[in-house]
Image (cartoon, coloured by chain):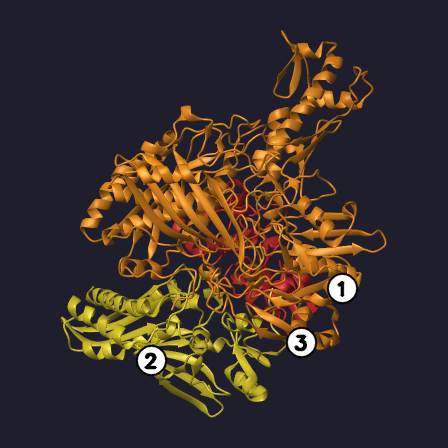
Chain colours: A yellow, B red, C orange
């Protein structure tokens, strides 16, 4: 079996301690929680951090709660917890849809929300889901904390706004009435990474789209967002024609690359097809 | 570094490298070779054990992460000479052939039944969907878990941490 | 859970008791005093000249005990080893590397982690060479010559081989009303057992004895090969194949890592363990298939199938390591005549070298029969489409009739027994075929894509008659030894080895059936060459057909010996004794009888035995099968295809197998279940593709996908029983039936679903992208990089 090379290990129990350890070890330290992205890369020796800072015991980051008109999700929340949460299901069916198809149940027991976002894999599901619902993220550092829209969080493949000495601590999702959401992914097999996936959050004003968020993953959409399709849809009738056209626009503006999961034209097609499907489903849910 | 891990109810103190994977800790340090490994990328799930009562893939957990925690492996399923119903179910329903994925499947099955004592076939399939089996085509594993659900008998919880047992 | 079960029938497996407790002993569970750990350095290039290998930094690692390179091995005359196809393969590369992942160096260290660390300290200087990754380019004039280690070689051609009567076949084709051609690829796949390959080698310098614990499906054949390769005396080699975590053909061959572990132990004087990681397993050990087939089928307008012919390009990788009986370089591919009464058939197969891993192993395919079945069953479906007839009807019309058996097919196989139409009808009834067709028509009217796929397969398994079949000169007959202890408990020693098939149970049941004692009173010893008689191992579904027969024969010998002893005990002429389950009695006097238990004690006691009877109760035998056995089956797969995404869902799978007499029906069903899942995997997701540079594009379980519980439906099994007339138990073997028969049923179902788009063929795997592109009329090569 492949095994990681040497590193130092520290276990933190609080955010302040994590930040202190990050300062101590410098830029070659990595934060680890579930470890399901990082440890395989370390085994393959594609990642060779000097130190790992284990945040599994930082229980202050393990919460899902509603405060005011926001859903707050701690970075240490496990995928399985997000999937099982009644309050998440009530407000954002998109996460239930997504979490059911992220990795597998055993990996979901361990993998965390913060870890998924920070890994910033261009095929990661939650990045698209959070983009669709226009979440914001909270990043802590020695000077305090800053928030920024999740749509500005990813700066490129495997790159985020989280800088040296910083820690993603929370994701906030605005709760707005009158809408619903959905997510759909196409994979080759259960537990596979997506060939493409789309998430939509839709707010209706009668028969009209009052507002919409569309997230796409694995298709090279900038910041995981189908911005042009969103723009088109706002104010349009929430009907099949609009959703089909939004799908077409989403497909046109994404930039997938071919790999063994499929050729680029297929992924582009999926971007459109899935965009239309999740809009349709989100609208159905919003109406009921 | 020095760690203390409770495995199947017994406390072990060991001095290990931080990079030691939990699966190797169990197999090589403690000689508990019932937990197998089958890939490098946390896809196959044959290394599944329960960490503080929750199944995890032990090839993707560091032994140091288990410091102060409790682990349960296949060796801990049988209690006082009495097989766990999932063990019986796998025999009854021919839920295993080569036996390599079996320990991990048993741990997940026990956890599933602890949380959902009467799962549907589909729920069983979902629960084991992160664990590969090359022999059974899964059918008899599903039947075995269903058998265990129908014969709860003397089931033993996935958790062996005293805290949780008394909680 | 003790069992007093006697004879054939469903009974719990004896081996389960240890497995459910985590008490199995697999190779990686073996721990010896002072054991060291080996790790292999692999080539990142698919084709490159080795300029230099610098191991100094690795050797300086404080925990490293030895670093072995091709040069080290060359000095021991061990740099190359024979393959199962009479080619040679580099153990560690000396001149060139010829596929990505080829073994270059071997590190032995105090622990596994240090051995891995030391690999990074070895510096190899490569000069990359042009690559041939596509078999279809291998014979091009400008293709680089891969095997320039063989003097005078100027191309990548390995062999041309043909079977059947070409002239007669061409005549039938020329005169046929309808001829349909279809090119198809059975892509390169990997057996991928969950336990990778490995070995613990322990050379005892004092006794000169080498003991290896290793993942082998053929311990005796491996022992002989080690003797031949390493020049070690064969009686000083003990091969132990302990519990094996699945084989599926992957553990038939001998891999460089095994030889390195042995050399490592010889060099260090300590036991050495080497276990592959998953990438090593997928990249370097035996692949299967990689057959590029151009098939044709000829028929009358009324739908009588007349002939089949095929030209095949076989990609054997960088070394010809294909596992099959010597005289059959394409395995048993020429049983592509299938289950039909053909007037003529012909195939020609050309084997080529490419810069890909060697192998060509029986991945649950009975020596290329899965390719054969895929070919003929796809062609029959294509023909049905051409003729506009229902594929079930076309098959029923052409299946061999019971009165035609034994039947010699157009390529020379003698099919032993069958009632094919009956089996297909059972499957059609179970599936509710007519209702399914009606549902499909309704769905099509709404634009929904539902497909129904059939396959009817005939296998030729149980290799084989030693007159025709050997591997590297070793005949394919199997020994068996049975000893009944004084108290009536028995030990059966067999040459075949279980990788999950449940031999400890099934073989005990054979003895139990023949001797009338409980199966639990029979201990089956296997997987240890010092403890068992010679035989060629477990693959090609040969355990029950060959060793199962040996077990029956040896038990009957013991029973006959028992008759002589019973005669002495009963003071009767042995010829006047009758047998009933477990006892001999005097004909006409049921009361006057003795049980095997009584006889066993007497045979070991002071009873005066007739002249010529030596005492004790044991026997040995070597079973040389008179023919192969021909299991068959009818499979029906129902799929739904999402036209918007190309995603295939297998809704139902009906499998009706006829494997002759079933010794333990529970185990038979389990074997079928596993094979069906494998079929889903191959048809829908498993593939090892390579890019132009020869990079392996499926080198982990993230990229080489195996089916999970979610892709597999709840299997619906049925059976018919047509005993083999020449097997002592009437059994035919079933280990690979489902893997052979199921992939094409899935493909036929998907192609059937895509009929509204005019699709008549699509190559595996039918991934969502492949299906969608097929719908668009723009399929891609599934064995190459997707661009």
Q: Where in the figure is residue C511, as x and y percent of width and height?
A: 63, 29
Q: Going by the picture, which residue comes out furthest to the top?
A: C588
Spatial CA span between label 3 and label 1: 23 Å
Q: Quadrant of residue A189?
A: bottom left
- Crowding at dot 2, Cα within 10 Å, few <14 / some 14-19 / many 20+, comes out as many
Q: Quadrant of residue A210?
A: bottom left
Q: Residue at x 52, y 70 (%)?
A: C130
Query: Of B95 and C403, which appears nearest the observer?
Result: C403
Where is the N terminus of chain C found, in terms of image quarters?
Answer: top right
Picture disc at residue C121: 3
- State how many labels appear: 3
Residue C2 vs C686, above or below: the answer is: above
Q: Where in the figure is residue C749, as x and y percent of width and height?
A: 33, 47
Query: Of C495 and C523, which appears nearest the observer?
Result: C495
Q: Quadrant of residue C785?
A: bottom left
- Crowding at dot 1, Cα within 10 Å, few <14 / some 14-19 / many 20+, comes out as few
Q: Which residue is mark 2?
A: A222
Q: Mark 3 falls within which chain?
A: C
Q: Earlier in the sequence, mark 3 or mark 1?
A: 1
Q: Where in the figure is residue C608, as x and y percent of width and height?
A: 81, 15
Q: Is residue A97 visible?
A: yes
Residue C270 vs C615, above or below: the answer is: below
Mark 1: secondary structure: helix
């Amino acid at each position: 079996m492949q095994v990681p090379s040497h590193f130092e290990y520290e276990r933190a129990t609080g955010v302040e301690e994590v930040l202190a350890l990050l300062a101590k070890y410098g830029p070659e330290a990595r934060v680890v929680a579930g470890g399901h992205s990082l440890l395989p890369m370390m085994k393959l020796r594609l990642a060779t951090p000097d130190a790992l800072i284990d945040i599994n015991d930082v229980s202050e980051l393990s919460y899902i709660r509603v405060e005011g008109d926001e859903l707050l999700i701690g970075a240490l929340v496990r995928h399985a917890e997000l999937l099982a949460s009644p309050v998440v299901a009530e407000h954002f069916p998109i996460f239930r849809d997504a979490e059911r198809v992220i990795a597998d149940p055993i990996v979901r027991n361990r993998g965390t929300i913060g870890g998924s976002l920070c890994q910033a894999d261009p095929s990661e599901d939650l990045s698209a889901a959070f983009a669709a619902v226009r979440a914001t993220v909270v990043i802590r550092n020695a000077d305090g904390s800053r928030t920024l829209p999740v749509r500005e969080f990813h700066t490129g493949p495997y790159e985020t706004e989280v800088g040296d000495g910083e820690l993603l601590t929370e994701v906030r999702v605005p709760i707005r009435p009158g809408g619903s959401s959905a997510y759909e992914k196409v994979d080759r097999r259960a537990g596979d990474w997506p060939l493409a996936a789309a998430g939509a959050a839709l707010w209706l004003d009668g028969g009209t789209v009052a507002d919409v968020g569309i997230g796409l993953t694995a298709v090279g959409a900038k910041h995981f967002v189908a911005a042009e399709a969103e723009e088109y849809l706002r104010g349009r009738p929430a009907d099949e024609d609009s959703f089909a056209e939004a799908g077409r626009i989403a497909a046109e503006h994404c930039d997938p690359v071919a790999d063994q999961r499929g050729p680029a034209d297929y992924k582009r097609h999926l971007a459109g097809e899935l965009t239309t499907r999740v809009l349709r489903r989100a609208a159905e849910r919003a109406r009921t | 570094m020095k760690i203390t891990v409770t495995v199947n109810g017994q406390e072990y103190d060991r001095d290990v490298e931080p990079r030691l994977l939990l699966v190797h800790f169990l197999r090589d340090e403690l000689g508990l070779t019932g937990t197998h490994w089958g890939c490098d990328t946390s896809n196959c799930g044959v290394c599944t054990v329960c960490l503080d009562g929750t199944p995890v893939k032990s090839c993707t957990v560091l032994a140091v992460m288990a410091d102060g925690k409790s682990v349960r492996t296949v060796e801990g399923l049988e209690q006082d000479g009495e097989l766990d119903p999932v063990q019986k179910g796998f025999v009854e329903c021919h839920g295993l052939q080569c036996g390599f994925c079996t320990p991990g499947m048993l741990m997940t099955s026990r956890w599933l039944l602890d949380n959902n004592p009467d799962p549907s076939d589909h729920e069983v399939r979902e629960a084991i969907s992160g664990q590969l089996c090359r022999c059974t085509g899964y059918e008899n594993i599903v039947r075995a878990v269903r058998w265990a659900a129908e014969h709860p008998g003397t089931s033993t919880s996935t958790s062996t941490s005293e805290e949780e047992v008394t909680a | 859970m003790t069992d007093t079960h006697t004879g054939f029938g469903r009974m719990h497996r004896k081996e389960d008791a240890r497995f459910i407790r985590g008490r199995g002993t697999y190779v990686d569970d073996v721990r010896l005093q002072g054991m060291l750990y080996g790790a292999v350095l692999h080539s990142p290039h698919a084709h490159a000249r080795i300029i230099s290998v610098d191991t100094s930094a690795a050797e300086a690692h404080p925990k490293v005990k030895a670093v072995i390179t091709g040069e080290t091995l060359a000095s021991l005359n061990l740099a190359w080893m024979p393959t199962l196809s009479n080619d040679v393969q580099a153990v560690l590369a000396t001149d060139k590397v010829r596929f990505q992942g080829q073994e270059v160096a071997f590190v032995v260290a105090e622990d596994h982690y240090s051995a891995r660390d030391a690999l990074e300290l070895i510096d190899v200087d490569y000069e990359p060479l042009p690559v041939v990754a596509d078999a279809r380019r291998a014979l091009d004039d400008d293709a680089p010559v891969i095997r320039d280690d063989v003097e005078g070689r100027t191309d990548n051609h390995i062999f041309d081989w043909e079977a059947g009567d070409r002239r007669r076949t061409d005549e039938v084709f020329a005169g046929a009303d309808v001829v349909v051609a279809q090119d198809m690829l059975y892509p390169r796949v990997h057996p991928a057992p969950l336990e990778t390959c490995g070995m613990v080698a322990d050379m005892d310098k004092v006794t000169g004895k080498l003991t290896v614990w290793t993942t082998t499906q053929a311990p005796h054949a491996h022992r002989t090969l080690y003797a031949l390769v390493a020049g070690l005396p064969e009686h000083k080699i003990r091969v132990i194949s302990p519990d094996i975590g699945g084989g599926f053909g992957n553990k038939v061959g001998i891999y460089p890592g095994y030889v390195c572990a042995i050399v490592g132990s010889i060099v260090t004087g300590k036991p050495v363990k080497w276990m592959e990681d998953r990438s090593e397993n997928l990249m370097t050990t035996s692949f299967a298939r990689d057959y590029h087939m151009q098939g044709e089928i000829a028929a009358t307008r009324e739908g009588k199938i007349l002939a089949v012919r095929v030209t095949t390009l076989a990609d054997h990788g960088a070394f010809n390591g294909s596992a099959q009986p010597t005289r059959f370089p394409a395995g048993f591919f020429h049983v592509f005549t299938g289950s039909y009464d053909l007037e003529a058939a012909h195939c020609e197969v050309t084997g080529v070298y490419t810069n890909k891993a060697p192998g060509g192993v029986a991945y649950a395919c009975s020596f290329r029969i899965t390719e054969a079945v895929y070919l003929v069953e796809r062609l029959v479906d294509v023909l049905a489409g051409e003729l506009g007839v229902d594929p079930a009807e076309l098959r029923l019309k052409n299946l061999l009739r019971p009165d035609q058996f034994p039947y010699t097919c157009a390529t020379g196989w003698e099919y032993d027994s069958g009632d094919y139409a009956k089996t297909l009808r059972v499957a059609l009834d179970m599936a509710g075929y007519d209702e399914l067709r009606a549902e499909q028509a309704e769905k099509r009217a709404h634009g929904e894509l539902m497909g129904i796929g059939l396959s009817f397969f005939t296998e030729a398994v149980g290799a084989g008659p030693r007159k025709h079949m050997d591997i590297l000169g070793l005949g394919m007959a199997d020994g068996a030894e049975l000893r009944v202890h004084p108290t009536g408990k028995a030990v059966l020693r067999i040459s075949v080895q279980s990788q999950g098939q449940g031999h400890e149970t099934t073989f005990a049941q054979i003895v139990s059936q023949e001797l009338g004692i409980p199966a639990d009173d029979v201990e089956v010893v296997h997987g240890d060459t010092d403890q068992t008689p010679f035989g060629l191992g477990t693959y090609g579904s040969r355990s029950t057909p060959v060793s199962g027969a040996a077990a029956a024969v040896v038990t009957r010998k013991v029973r006959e010996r028992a008759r002589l002893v019973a005669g002495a005990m009963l003071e009767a002429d042995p010829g006047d004794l009758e047998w009933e389950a477990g006892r001999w009695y005097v004909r006409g006097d049921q009361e006057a009888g003795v049980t095997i238990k009584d006889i066993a004690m007497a045979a070991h006691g002071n009873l005066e035995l007739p002249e010529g009877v030596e005492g004790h109760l044991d026997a040995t035998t070597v079973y040389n099968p008179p023919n192969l056995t021909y299991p068959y089956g009818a499979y029906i797969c129902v799929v739904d295809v999402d036209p918007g995404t190309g995603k295939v869902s297998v809704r139902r799978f009906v499998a009706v197998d006829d494997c002759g007499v079933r010794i333990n029906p529970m185990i038979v069903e389990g074997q079928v279940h596993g094979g069906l899942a494998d079929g889903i995997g191959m048809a829908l997701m498993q593939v090892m593709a390579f890019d132009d540079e020869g990079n392996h594009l499926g080198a982990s379980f993230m990229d080489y996908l195996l089916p999970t519980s979610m892709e597999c439906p709840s299997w619906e099994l049925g059976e018919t029983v047509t005993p083999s007339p020449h097997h002592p138990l009437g059994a035919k073997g079933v280990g690979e039936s489902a893997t052979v028969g199921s992939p094409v049923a899935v493909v036929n179902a998907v192609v059937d679903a895509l009929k509204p788009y005019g699709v008549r063929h699509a190559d595996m795997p039918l991934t969502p992208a492949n299906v969608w592109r097929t719908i668009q009329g723009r399929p891609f090569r599934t064995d190459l990089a997707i661009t």
